[in-house]
Amino acid sequence: MSRTDRLGDVVLTLPLLGLLRQRWPGAEILFLTRQYARPVAEACAHVHRVVEWPDHHAATAAARAALLRDTGADTLLHLFPRREVAIAGRDAGIARRIGTARRWYHWLTCTERVNVSRKRSALHEAQLNLLVAAPLLHQSRLSLAELVPHAGLTRAAPLDAAWASRIDPARCTVLVQPLTGGTVPAWPLERWTALARALDPSRFQLFVTGSADEGAQLREWLRSLPAHVEDATGQSLALLLSFTRAADCFVGASTGPLHIAAALGVPTIGLYPARESGLPARWEPLGARTTMLLQAPPPGGDHATLDISAIDVDEVRREVERVARER
């Protein structure tokens, strides 16, 4: 199973792994991914082994082929088409190699090609994964509700004592991810500030998550927030998995951590723009308790130019308070 792109894409691949385990109960599932996404693959109950794809350019074609040959795999499924992986799979002598017919190099490197176009499809990303994997499945068209139980993100380690001691069980623990790394529109920081001030400190505690670099960007802003908001940026991905599993709610845009929270079964509130590439129809987080707040386009507005800044603070607050009532 090859998925060497972004974190959210890796998470949305997990339900397919559960379906493959059902279809091929005796098979060993190997997950080829980048180093930074390894903790997610390791936390999935359907994955037997994780294989790290080398990100550095120093890796030779021969070394890449040897990496895949040494796995002993007899099938390679290209869920994220990448020429270097396709060439390595062919040169490694993997017998069955499946990928989309929409990449010219797959005609030279794959033994089976599936005519799937992600760009022109209205299906969810997880459903598109099933179409690419159709040669390995009994059924390749399932609803999102049918996919949710198959994620298998159940191996996150228990939260360590130092972080667990920061959680007040008497209050609703809300994780918020203000920044997005530029991959999708971000809700403005002033909206996050207003949300924090609107949530009762006696009932809520908020933890701001993000990478170490994002934490540095947010340092001055974090100092301006009320006392019930704490800095949790700079965690490792493994720790973020554990911390998210211990939380009561996650709020953020369509980034990897949002998809992780949904797959862990944590109530998740996603903030989405009203434009084609970011619509929940394609990138909705898969989980039993997810809510999408979508900025509506103005009358006659151009969908392509919209961001999420107009999503109302009170609307987000109401959703967070609903989660607190239901926990």
Image (spheres, rainbow, N blue to C red):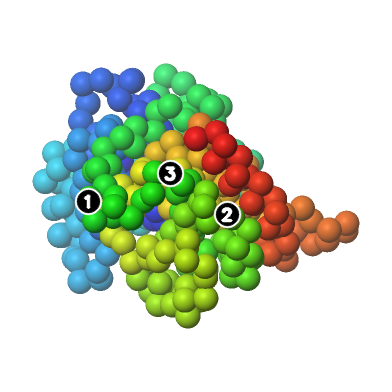
Q: Residues within 10 Å of mark 3 (few under 14, many from 20)?
A: few
Q: Is any atom of residue 106 visible in this view?
A: no
The residue closer to the viewer here, 163 or 105, is 163
Residue 217 locus on image (x, y percent): 45, 77
Where residue 308 sits, quadrant-wise, is: bottom right
Q: Which residue is mark 2?
A: 200
Q: Tell me the CA gap for discs 1 and 2.
A: 26 Å
User: Which mark, by number, is residue 170?
Assistant: 3
Q: Tell me the CA gap for discs 2 and 3.
A: 13 Å
Q: Is any atom of residue 224 visible in this view?
A: yes
Helix or strand or loop: what does disc 1 sit on? helix
Helix or strand or loop: what does disc 3 sit on? loop
Residue at 15% across / 60% down in the picture? 63
Q: Residues within 10 Å of mark 1 (few under 14, many from 20)?
A: few
Residue extending furthest front?
Answer: 202
Residue 98 locus on image (x, y percent): 36, 38
The amino acid type, in three-letter code, at marker 2 is Asp
The residue closer to the viewer here, 98 or 293, is 293
Q: Tell me the CA gap for discs 1 and 3.
A: 17 Å
Residue at 68% across / 64% down in the picture? 309
Mark 1 and mark 3 lie on one chain; the one further toward the N terminus is 1
Helix or strand or loop: what does disc 2 sit on? loop
Residue extending furthest left?
Answer: 70
Q: Is residue 133 above or below residue 194?
A: above
User: Which mark, by number, is residue 226?
Assistant: none
Q: Which residue is mark 1?
A: 161
Where residue 156 sits, quadrant-wise, is: top left
Residue 295 locus on image (x, y percent): 72, 54
Mark 1 and mark 2 lie on one chain; the one further toward the N terminus is 1
Mark 2 and mark 3 lie on one chain; the one further toward the N terminus is 3
